[in-house]
Amino acid sequence: MTITDQRPANLVSDPEIPLSDPRTAQRMVEPVARTAVEIIRDLRPENALARIVTPEIATMLARRASLTRRLRTATGYTPPQKIIVSGVRTCVVNERTVEASCVLREPDRSRFLAMRWELRHSGWRVTVLEVG
């Protein structure tokens, strides 16, 4: 890629790995987990993962971001901005399904995040997302 090349850099894919390979979803676990928590904390726009998650997951993230905004307005609470993603684990259920989990560490607490990726006609999508 040269400086004049206008194509977006794809940090997730490897030219040797086809898009339908489960390793593609495995590489996306950490950045998607971080972005999901940043949406919930209202640090990113609610549509930041719109192309990767199902509409139901996008609605859930938007609802939780709304709750964060209400909490911030009512109490002045500001969530910490530093998130460390660790302990990423993936399990390839079959060639079209990957389940993943990770630990999200913040200065004052740790959270667990689990997600299920499914290969759809348009690529890998998060169909289940649980944040504890």
Image (tube, rainbow, N blue to C red):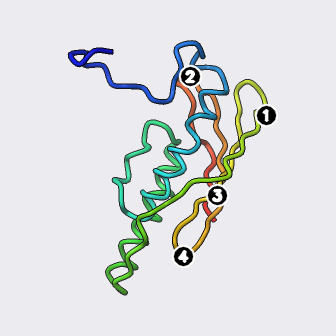
Which residue lies under the disc numbered 3? 103
Residue at horizontal 36 percent and vertical 60 percent from the top: 43
* For marks 1 and 2 on the same chain, the one whose residue lies earlier in the sequence: 1
The residues bearing labels 1 and 2 have C-alpha atoms spaced at a distance of 18 Å
State if disc 2 and disc 1 touch (CB < 8 Å): no
- Relative to residue 27, is residue 70 drawn left or right? left
- Marks 3 and 2, how far apart at CA: 30 Å
Instruction: Report the residue marked by disc 1.
Output: 93
- Among the two numbered marks 1 and 4 on one chain, the one whose residue lies closer to the N terminus: 1
Kindly report which numbered mark, 4 or 2, lies closer to the viewer in this rendering.
Answer: 4
Q: Position of residue 5 (x, y in %)?
A: 25, 15
Q: Are marks 1 and 4 in contact (CB under 8 Å)?
A: no
Q: Which residue is mark 2?
A: 121
Q: Nearer the viewer, mark 3 or mark 2?
A: 3
Measure the alpha-carbon separation of dots 4 and 2: 40 Å
Q: Quadrant of residue 85?
A: bottom right
Image coords of residue 23 (percent x, y): 65, 27
Q: Nearer the viewer, residue 121 or 7?
A: 7
According to the image, label 4 marks what residue? 108
Amino acid type of the residue tagged 4 in the rendering:
Asp
Q: Secondary structure at mark 3?
A: strand
23 to 72, vertically: above or below = above
